Image: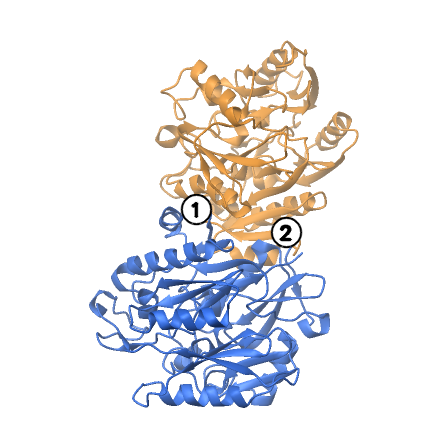
Chain colours: A blue, B orange
Amino acid sequence: MAKRIDSTPKKDGYRMPGEFEPQRQIWMIWPERPDNWRNGAKPAQRAFANVAIAISQFEPVTMVASREQYANCRNMLPPEIRVVEMSNDDAWMRDCGPTFVVNDKGCVRGIDWDFNAWGGLVDGLYFPWANDDAIAQKVCEIEGVDTYRTPGFVLEGGSIHVDGEGTLITTEMCLLSEGRNPHMTKEQIEEQLKEYLNLEKIIWIKDGIDPEETNGHIDDVACFVRPGEAACIWTDDPANPFYEEAQAAYKTLSEATDAKGRKLKVHKLCLTKKPCLLSGAETIDAVEGTLPREDGEVCIASYMNFLIVNGGVVVPQYDDENDKLALEQIQAMFPDRKVVGVSTKEVVFGGGNIHCITQQQPAGR
Amino acid sequence: MAKRIDSTPKKDGYRMPGEFEPQRQIWMIWPERPDNWRNGAKPAQRAFANVAIAISQFEPVTMVASREQYANCRNMLPPEIRVVEMSNDDAWMRDCGPTFVVNDKGCVRGIDWDFNAWGGLVDGLYFPWANDDAIAQKVCEIEGVDTYRTPGFVLEGGSIHVDGEGTLITTEMCLLSEGRNPHMTKEQIEEQLKEYLNLEKIIWIKDGIDPEETNGHIDDVACFVRPGEAACIWTDDPANPFYEEAQAAYKTLSEATDAKGRKLKVHKLCLTKKPCLLSGAETIDAVEGTLPREDGEVCIASYMNFLIVNGGVVVPQYDDENDKLALEQIQAMFPDRKVVGVSTKEVVFGGGNIHCITQQQPAGR
């Protein structure tokens, strides 16, 4: 059913569609690591369930869960959400899952990038990561989707956004990091992305906002709303910890033209008023090989980490003064979609958000 | 996607189709237990692969494999066979997998019987069996097939055969065994089967031929070839160890009428000339809680344990003098199907055969 293809998507006429294009379903991974999630991952599981339920009002969701958590996961989710057993090292389907590509006839294939836990032995977040690295292939296998592999080329889905018409945005901080593809020049990385995602233009933003975790994934900073239009985090308060990164990203995007030669329209999206601070760190197992955690450390809580689904947008909420403003700004970007907020502070405490824990499978034939 | 239904198939208009009706795919489990299979299960894995490959010339096959064996299984099978991760306790999909039922509109549902390793704490073959018991639900979940459950009612797929028109054949030795449903009378068991498989008539054969293992599953003794016609093991050699069981089963079937009032036509199928004897028992891990194994013990090798697939029949072969005769007899029963033999001595050494290690999912809409 699912074969490995030795060609490249560009050669075969496949391209990565924009997240705003029609989707077949959303994939997620059930969280469980007690050395990453507070209180034995129980509050995180509730939050993941709420995200899955919010998405499932728009389209199907498949949650994968380990052997150990399968029964609990099945019991915590409503029956319309499919649960499939799959070993994992943590819960970030955006980054270890496949990147799907489509052709003009509606055929769908998957790209199985190398995954090394955001930096491998250089500055990766856990070891080992073999279960996570196998997830892309296992997902495609279940769906009967043929796959491309990129041995020796490390990429996470959260480090890229495309407009589906030949343009990609990413960050230098991540893609040029020491822990990913240090053997490749920036030009070689560009070539690789163009060949696998079928692109003509890559817009490089310098920095992301979480250097310690994903080395600055784009999906906390900016995304495409539709071809010709992007969204970007924004603050005019110089006291905001992300002021410089937001200003710089906005400037880069505003001055950029896309693959079709269009000057991008850039929508501004607010940041939280207050930083999101970790509490309850003492309920996270302290284990050699994972980052030590402390109460009061700043967790990255970006409203940009929303997910676009069929007819909707699912947006993180943090009990912050700006929650409502973020929903309004996103609604203004997507006037034809229903915008739904989900409280995801628990996901933030684990190191990501709605976009990080999901991966869309595009609609096919 | 997959819901638990509190009704029964009969109430909802669903019935179990005959194995000879159109199928969507075949499910199998990859073998690995070193305390059941010789030489670390490597020869058995080759045999299972050969069975899967033989089936895949007729219809799709999904092989489920544990986390530990996933990569090896994927590498040992051709790409057209789908591999899905699934925890298991051993490799008998016929017995722990779902029994599928269909309705007139082509909707498919699954029955998730209780599974207790062929006798639970009374005379079951291994402990624990929780992973196997969860397989039926996991298979249905992947396919988006709704399920019926039968809490407190133990049944294995290998203990029943149906004609798809209201008739079931089974053995008293198995269904009335102490280790399955001792709290139920024969009449109550009949009622349960009629309600879940949508039957009017149950034909009881007294004994199977493997009392020590499955307590005499029907699928080593007899099956339906098509409505109104059965096949039954046969020998007229009183020295054959299964002479009495074969004679008795043939007599019962020959005298039986089915749910439609038809007198059954019964095709005779030979037994092996020589018994199949275990060798290499010293390469099977000796572990507390599993049956001790010794060289020279008789392994049950019945030609009846074939699988009917779309346009074909896949038949076990044992390097026995009667291998060819069995193929000829089965070809005569199924003149419109291609009959394919596969060498499965290694599967026999583990306690079953082609029918035991497969489960058909009927074609649906």
Front-lying residue, B239 or B333: B333
Chain assignment, label 2: B
Q: Which residue is mark 1?
A: B285
Q: Residue at x 72, y 70 (%)?
A: A12
Q: Residue at x 58, y 70 (%)?
A: A18
Quadrant of res A66: bottom left
Quadrant where the C terminus of chain B sits is top right
The dot on residue B32 is: none
B146 over A274 or under it: above or below: above
Q: Residue B71 location in percent, x, y? A: 54, 59
Q: Residue extending furthest right?
A: B335
Q: Is residue A355 left or right of residue B45?
A: left
Residue type at numbered disc 2: Ile
Q: Residue A190 location in percent, x, y? A: 60, 84
Front-lying residue, A29 or A133: A29
Q: Which residue is mark 2?
A: B81
Q: Is residue A75 left or right of residue B174?
A: left
Tell me which label, 1 or 2, sits earlier in the chain: 2
Between marks 1 and 2, how big is the CA–CA gap? 30 Å
Q: Residue at x 53, y 34 (%)?
A: B296
Secondary structure under tag 1 reads loop
